[in-house]
Image (spheres, rainbow, N blue to C red):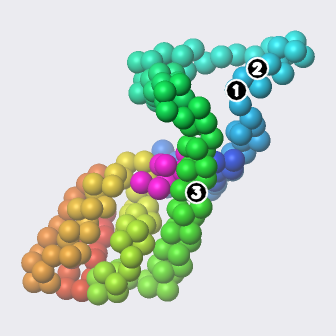
Amino acid sequence: GLKGLSAIQFSTSIDLVSQKKKKEGKITIIRPLLNVPRKEILAYLRKNKMPFRIDKTNLRTAFVRNKIRHRLLRQLEKEYNPKIQEALYRLSQSAANDYDFINKYSSAWLKMNKTLTISKLIKLHPAIQREVIRLSIEKYIPSLQEIELGHVDEILKVIKSKKGKQQAIKFKKLKIRRKGDKLIMSKT
């Protein structure tokens, strides 16, 4: 989704999660050299005779992200758009801005609506619906990397199902069910 398309940002707040899966606070990671091309950084280090290390796993094309970086992007630059890296960077920044808005709007909606009332939820734009659900799940599963778009889409199907139909979804240690006009989430 948009969050993944946003790529790595200049600063990121990360929840610290204990071994018992409880939030223990936050740390902020700042990446001041994120928009400086790698070639420029390496040239500076060599010119100033500064030691550096290269993570050799970043060179192996066994990983999809590296295959994209080393093969696909180079082919796209050569054959289609010599400025593909810049275009993708602009796309990631645009996605980050859009996601930031959706996230803030959804967070505000959740603060005003303490329960997930289906009749209110279905009136929201689909992008807001997804983020409201994702943020609601985050209360039970701190590491949202385990939540995929498919999970959220399954929950949206439950929301859009007929009122009388009792449906439930279980994943990880979370049960999500529809009860009348409410969407109920509980730990299993």
Q: Which residue is disc 2 drawn over? A: 42
- Residue 38 drawn at (x, y percent): 70, 26
Circles 1 and 3: CB atoms closer than 8 Å: no
Q: Mark 2 or 3 closer to N-term?
A: 2
User: Where 74 sits versus 91, above or below?
Assistant: above
Name which residue lies at 48% across and 74% down. 106
85 sits left or right of 115 in the view: right
The Cα–Cα distance between marks 1 and 3, rounded to whole angstroms, is 22 Å
Q: Looking at the picture, which amino acid does disc 1 mark?
A: Arg
| Quarter of the image where one finds residue 138 | bottom left
Q: Which residue is disc 3 drawn over? A: 94
What stretch of residues is rendered in magenta? 1-7
Circles 2 and 1: CB atoms closer than 8 Å: yes
Q: Looking at the picture, which amino acid does disc 2 mark?
A: Leu
Q: Disc count in the image?
A: 3
Mark 2, residues whose alpha carbon is within 10 Å: few (<14), some, or many (≥20)? few
Q: Of residues 22 and 180, which is closer to you in this image? A: 180
Can residue 188 be seen at all in this image of the molecule? no
Q: Secondary structure at mark 1?
A: helix
Q: Which residue is disc 1 drawn over? A: 38
Q: Of residues 179 and 186, which is closer to you in this image? A: 179
33 sits left or right of 3 in the view: right
Mark 1, residues whose alpha carbon is within 10 Å: few (<14), some, or many (≥20)? few
Q: Which mark is residue 126?
A: none
Q: Mark 1 or 3 closer to N-term?
A: 1
- Residue 80 drawn at (x, y percent): 49, 33
| Quarter of the image where one finds residue 58 | top right
Mark 3, residues whose alpha carbon is within 10 Å: few (<14), some, or many (≥20)? some
Name which residue lies at 23% across and 62% down. 154
Q: Looking at the picture, which amino acid does disc 3 mark?
A: Ser
